[in-house]
Amino acid sequence: MYAIDATDITKDYGKGEVLHGISYQVPTGQIAALLGPNGAGKTTLIEILEGHRGRTSGRVEVLGLDPGNRRDFAQLRTRMSVVLQQTMLEPGLSVRDILRRHASYYPDPLDVDDALAQVELTEKRSALVKSLSDGQRRRLDLALALTGRPELLFLDEPTTGLDPVSRRRIRGLVAGLRESGTTVVLTSHDLTEVQELADRVDVIRDGSFIASGSPDDLVRGSAAYTVVEFARPEGTDDRLPEGAELVNGRVRILTDDQDAVVERVQAWARDEGTRISGLTIVPPSLDDAYVAMLDNGVLEAEKSE
Amino acid sequence: MSVTGTERARSTRRPSSFWLHVDGELKEFWRSPITLAFIVLMPVMFYVGFGLAFRSQADEIRLVGEHEVTQANLSFGGILGFALMSVAFANVAIGLAIRRHHGLFKRFRTTPVSPATVMGAYLVNTLLTAVIVLGVVTAIGLLGMGVTIDPARLPQLLAALVLGFLCMAPLGAAASLLPPNADAAVPMVNGIFFPTAFLAGGFVILPLGDTVGAVVDLLPGRPLTLLVQGALSESGPVWDWSAVALLLAWSLLGTVAALRWFRWASEREPRGFGSSRRKGEDEAPKPEETGA
């Protein structure tokens, strides 16, 4: 069962296609991340799914409705919410005023106090928006999005510019949405956040998807390496294990077979009559995998030219 | 589907989106020191300044078109037109431009709230503000500036002000489309508002040449000022029909421009609640056509 089921979408603004017949599915109740560099077509795709931009061709179903159809779009707006990256909230209104007004748009909204409790803003109920911190405003954004009890939530850069504590809080809230069965489409440049939250990730580049899967699948399938590092043993002069390099006084080896490297390093230490200390093994992250994917894309494009 | 008594009671207790928007607009306006200073206090300060400057000539008769009007009433009529332009034109143009470029409208567009609710509430707040500002100016005029209003011409005065509002508010909505970003809103709108307001001749009759004078006569500030000052005169025709026609023409022009090019977000597309989407919808094959 898909919350979003889109097939063969193209979009042409008149200066050539920006989406080239792509298909995109998000299973109900999952957190799906959509990644891609600026200008890749991410925003266009999201706005087509939200119903705020027309598609040139293709079929789109969001919660079983066509966002390109006027009547479906009206119904869809009562069942989904969008948290935009940076939008104004009236500074002279209180948190309660804004939530109360927002709740009035929906047939069965969350109680204002319940919405505030969900985002841990109860104590700011009567505060004016202009007195809130960035993190508190972002939580208010989320409270507004939750007020209509959405089945589907589009989240654009939910933690950009926030301090670590606020980021962690917001991530906790988003993770909690999955437990309540809400489908979330997340766009973010913070790949640690994506790796932590997303059930699936789709990477778009130049209007086409170049990778899809769970964060672990993408990392495993990428050309990113595990980094094995240890302190340079004294008395080994310039002698290093095969494939190693010195980086900031530490010996570093990039590998896709960490067990073999560790065995090789142990054997090298025995031969050198020394001990290995400060050994760290850092598996590739989604961030590494993403950069490797985009780098490969550049290389492939250069090769094809 | 049946609705329980509790649910019905709960839904009937909920205030409508429209009134919550009006409430929000009122609070936002009256809690902002900047809007209070520029939209409410500025016309009052101008009036006090001009009124005191011409206090000694308050009873002298001036000729405005075919109307004889006292200096006190001339200044009062000028400031009424200025205040109306400030609230209904400059305030609307700046307010809408800032809301658009800061993404407030974009946020509304993602919700089920209707554009009529958002814009209607904004206009109600503008109307209430205009009533309050004009009321304060009138009170100052009557109590301290020697203004006299002929009760027989009061309906004409009110009609002129209503007509002015119906002209200036759509022009303000149309002018809100001009600034390319929020920072440009205040200088660009005031760049239109102040010259229009001063050239309208509400405070002093400027010695304009024939050509400039003819152009100024066609701008909306001049007919508004003429109508208001005419309603405050002690002689001359009750209605200046050419001024009425000109204001109605500007009102129509403003309304058409505001509706035709109105957009909810900074960027050109999407425009309106899915207007460009509907264009895309036309282009997209229907599910039955694709066999899906």
Image: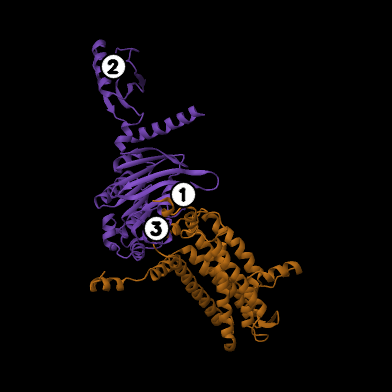
Chain colours: A purple, B orange
Residue drawn at x 55%, y 77% as measured from the top left: B162
Quadrant of the image occupied by residue A113:
bottom left
Residue in front for this viewpoint, A266 or A179: A179
Where in the figure is residue A265, as x and y percent of width and height? 27, 17
Residue drawn at x 50%, y 62% as measured from the top left: B96
Instruction: Compute the Cα span from label 3 to label 1.
Output: 43 Å
Instruction: Compute the Cα span from label 3 to label 2.
Output: 57 Å
Q: Is residue B174 left or right of residue B67?
A: left
Which residue is denoted by mark 3 in the rendering? A130
Residue in front for this viewpoint, B159 or B283: B283
Q: Which mark is residue A57?
A: 1
Of the residues shown, which amino acid type is indicated by label 2? Pro
- Other residues around mark 3 within 10 Å, as few (<14) / some (14–19) / many (≥20): some
- Other residues around mark 1 within 10 Å, as few (<14) / some (14–19) / many (≥20): many
Which residue is denoted by mark 2 in the rendering? A233
Say above or below: B4 vs A24. below
Say above or below: B237 vs B262. below
